Image: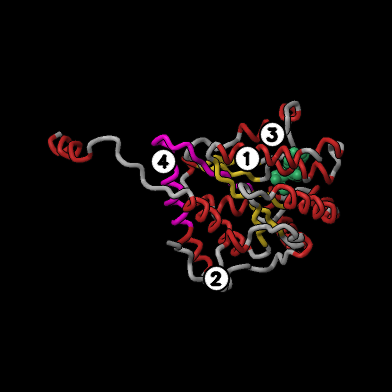
Amino acid sequence: MSDLPSQWTHEPRKVLRFRPGDKVADIDTDSSPGYSDGKDGSEELQNERNERFAGLQEMLYANGRAGDNRSLLLVLQGMDTAGKGGTVKHVVGAGNPQGIHYTSFGVPTEEERAHHYLWRVRKALPAAGNIGVFDRSHYEDVLVVRVHELVPRDVWEPRYDEINAFEKELVDSGTTLVKCAMFVSLDEQKRRLSERLERPDKYWKYNPGDVAERKLWPAYQEAYQAMLDRTSTDYAPWFVIPCDKKWYSRLAINELLIEALKGMKLEWPPADFDVEAEKKKLAEA
Ligand code: AMP
Ligand code: MG
């Protein structure tokens, strides 16, 4: 039975799923697809859904402890200020850190550069019962790398197929992928970047290089389009998240996580001991 809150008129996993032919240029970053309400009340709903997520996460973890090999991997991919960090804090942060494996992927270190680009990604995969969170991901190797021509085309071009094969392998070994492509408008990005310059508590998030990246938006748009066209598969589809409204993008990603966890049809693992006998023993202890 669905427990989708009534504010959602359509299931996020359906309404946000990237469809062949969808164009990045047409994404309305300020929209709130499938959601009938506005910001009012969203915080309350977020709190409620945080709890629902936390309950399911605990169940996944409990199953992992009981020998179930399944895991979940949340991939957050988006331009600066799209809200990747806020999603980690306000959505994933509601879970128990015991079962969450967070990794952010920055400019590869010298050691990482000496290896295949999937090397650091494989090392960061979630163990059984865990939720892995990728703040940026292997997709940088067909995004920033493509836009800046960090390697020649004949090197990045085969990566789309290679990533698909890699993800197929993950899915076959019990990992459910939730891939979120987060889009913010250039105007909203400017507002968020300028806020970072106004507030000392946000300086740490500001990177002078981000301003130059804004000029490359057309090239990024093309790279994001290719990524979505070529790596949104049946087994690991992309979800396109409009991110100008933070309250919406967080609710949407929270709901995608809940839907993915529910899709695993988890139950609490049964006791591997005689409960009644243990109660009796304990009473007498
Ligand atoms: P941030 O997420 O704001 O900490 O920034 C991380 C930076 O690392 C971004 O500018 C990314 O584009 C960059 N980055 C991540 N992965 C790669 C990669 N494989 N090659 C080059 N740059 C990368
Ligand atoms: Mg940054």
Secondary structure of the residue carrying numbered label 3: loop
Residue at the spot of label 2: 9
Residue at (41% x, 36% y) in the render:
65
- Asked whether residue 58 is drawn in magenta, I would say yes
54 shown above or below 97: below
Mark 2 neighbour density, 10 Å: few (under 14) some (14–19) many (20 or more): some
Residue at (51% x, 55% y) in the render:
259
Q: Considering only order in the chain, which callout, 2 or 1, is on the residue closer to the N terminus?
A: 2
What is the spatial separation of the Cα atoms under label 1 and label 2, in whole angstroms? 31 Å
- Asked whether residue 73 is drawn in magenta, I would say yes
Q: Position of residue 69 (x, y in %)?
A: 47, 36
Q: Is residue 190 visible?
A: no
What is the spatial separation of the Cα atoms under label 4 and label 3, in whole angstroms? 28 Å
Q: Considering only order in the chain, which callout, 3 or 4, is on the residue closer to the N terminus?
A: 4
The quarter of the rendered structure image containing the C terminus is top left
Q: Position of residue 71 (x, y in %)?
A: 51, 41
Q: Considering only order in the chain, which callout, 2 or 4, is on the residue closer to the N terminus?
A: 2
Residue at (52% x, 52% y) in the render:
260
Q: Is mark 2 within 8 Å of ligand 1?
A: no
Residue type, mark 2 in image: Thr
| Residue 118 badge | 3
Residue at the spot of label 1: 168
Secondary structure of the residue carrying numbered label 4: helix
Foreground tag (3 vs 1): 1
| Residue 63 badge | 4
Part of the protein shown in magenta = 50-75
Q: Considering only order in the chain, which callout, 3 or 2, is on the residue closer to the N terminus?
A: 2
Q: Considering only order in the chain, which callout, 1 or 3, is on the residue closer to the N terminus?
A: 3
